[in-house]
Image (tube, coloured by chain):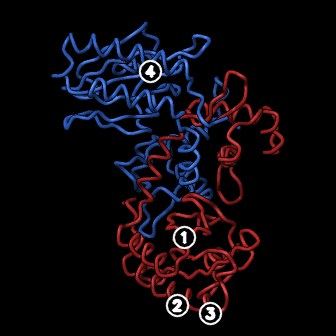
Chain colours: A blue, B red
């Protein structure tokens, strides 16, 4: 196996990155476009696609386009059950969303991105709507800065889109290790200095409660 | 990239098969056990785990055990949306389950296994309960025999467990290609010759309806 300096297996990373080109917004690809988008040689793309097909992760449709295969459902099932948060943590998210009247998200770091692992939508008609599984770049937005090591609470305006604001606080485990970022996100018009102060206070209290409960997922 | 005779990339298959060891029933592994279960050298396992960790698909916990990472949630989100069946097909499944009073499953073939892509549970207390994403070996059970090329309907008793019976029929596309197997599964005590004949008739009619609607998932 050809390994990179960090000990990772290059062809495996390429396969994962090829799979990552398939998103909710782009579920089918022509081989030609996969080649362009991945920057790999066409023969490499063809071999990686054939390999993913062998495990049902990709499918070549009769018209030649490549799409997501049913083998992904196995991973989906596993991820959905492994990443169920403890009910008491969900309760904290519900109470926080009700108190602050904004959407609450919990993010964990996964290498160079953050992944939303739980969300409780706020009660108002204009609200932040994301999805469990959504990724954000590390350092991006309030949660991204918390997970990038910012001290204490972080605030962002205009991310991930103009007019959106967010406040986030860190969640630690019993040994003080950073576990997650708890964030409140909504329209910037509702994130003035007074609200941000109140949100920060509510988030800090909720983060402490989650730290005490722990994030032990069912992945035991 | 080291390729096998069929053009697949060996290290990528190994990575997928390593990931496949993580199941709902076994969500964490020690490296030693992964080495035994995979039949790979320990150094290979460590490199593959490190590679999966780089993309957040696996995580090493503080106690050294390996578990499913949040990167899997991305695949979950994609698979769950890509494999949403058209609503008219879901309606056929609901009507069939109500008519036959047994659980209805739709399976597609993914290389050497079948994957359950939809399920409608029957109305009775004792009923078959499976899950979307569940896999069965090709040739196993009524659906497995249909997807392995059996002509017309197939019946199985005692699979996947003693006391379970199943009847399945093929679903074809407009060009006569085998797309899926539609199955009714329940306790063998309710699968006598009379019931099997009635189920076969209902399944055949439902399969024709699904063939007419098509299985075009949202993976367009």
First in sequence: mark 3 or mark 1?
1
How far across and how far down the image is residue B179, in percent?
A: 50, 74
Tell me how far mark 4 sits from mark 2, CA to CA: 55 Å
Residue carrying label 4 = A181
Residue carrying label 3 = B194
Residue A82 in view in this figure: yes
Q: Secondary structure under badge 3?
A: helix
Where residue B89 sits, quadrant-wise, is: bottom left
In the rendered structure, the answer to whether residue A134 lies left or right of residue A166 reads right
Tell me how far mark 4 sits from mark 3, CA to CA: 59 Å
How far across and how far down the image is residue B143, in percent?
A: 62, 75
- Disc 3 packing (10 Å; few <14; some 14–19; many ≥20): few
Q: What residue appears at the point 68 percent right and 36 percent down from the top-left corner?
A: B48
Pointer 2 and pointer 1 on the same chain: yes
Q: Which mark is residue B201?
A: 2
- Disc 2 packing (10 Å; few <14; some 14–19; many ≥20): some
Q: Is residue A9 above or below residue B217?
A: above
| Chain on which label 1 sits | B
Tell me how far mark 4 sits from mark 1, CA to CA: 40 Å
Q: What residue appears at the point 55 percent right and 75 percent down from the top-left corner?
A: B102
Tell me how far mark 2 sits from mark 1, CA to CA: 16 Å
Where residue A6 sits, quadrant-wise, is: top right
Residue B1 in view in this figure: no
| Chain on which label 2 sits | B
Residue carrying label 1 = B105
Q: Is residue A57 above or below residue A184?
A: below
In the rendered structure, the answer to whether residue A39 lies left or right of residue B132 reads left
Q: Which mark is residue A50?
A: none
Pointer 3 and pointer 2 on the same chain: yes
């Amino acid at each position: 196996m050809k390994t990179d300096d960090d000990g990772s297996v290059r062809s495996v990373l390429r396969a994962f990155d090829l799979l990552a080109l398939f998103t909710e917004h782009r579920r089918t690809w022509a081989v030609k476009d996969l080649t362009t988008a991945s920057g790999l040689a066409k023969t490499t793309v063809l071999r990686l696609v054939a390999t993913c097909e062998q495990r049902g992760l990709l499918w070549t449709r009769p018209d030649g386009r490549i799409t997501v295969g049913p083998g992904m459902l196995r991973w989906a099932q596993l991820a959905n059950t492994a990443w169920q948060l403890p009910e008491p943590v969900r309760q904290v998210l519900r109470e926080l969303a009700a108190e602050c009247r904004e959407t609450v998200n919990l993010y964990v770091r996964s290498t160079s991105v953050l992944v939303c692992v739980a969300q409780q939508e706020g009660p108002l008609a204009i609200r932040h709507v994301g999805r469990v599984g959504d990724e954000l770049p590390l350092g991006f937005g309030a949660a991204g800065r918390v997970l990038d090591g910012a001290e204490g609470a972080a605030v962002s305006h205009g991310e991930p889109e103009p007019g959106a604001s967010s406040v986030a606080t860190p969640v630690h485990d019993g040994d003080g290790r950073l576990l997650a970022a708890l964030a409140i996100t909504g329209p910037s018009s509702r994130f003035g200095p007074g609200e941000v102060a109140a949100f920060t206070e509510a988030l800090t209290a909720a983060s402490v409660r989650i730290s005490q409960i722990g994030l032990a997922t069912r992945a035991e």
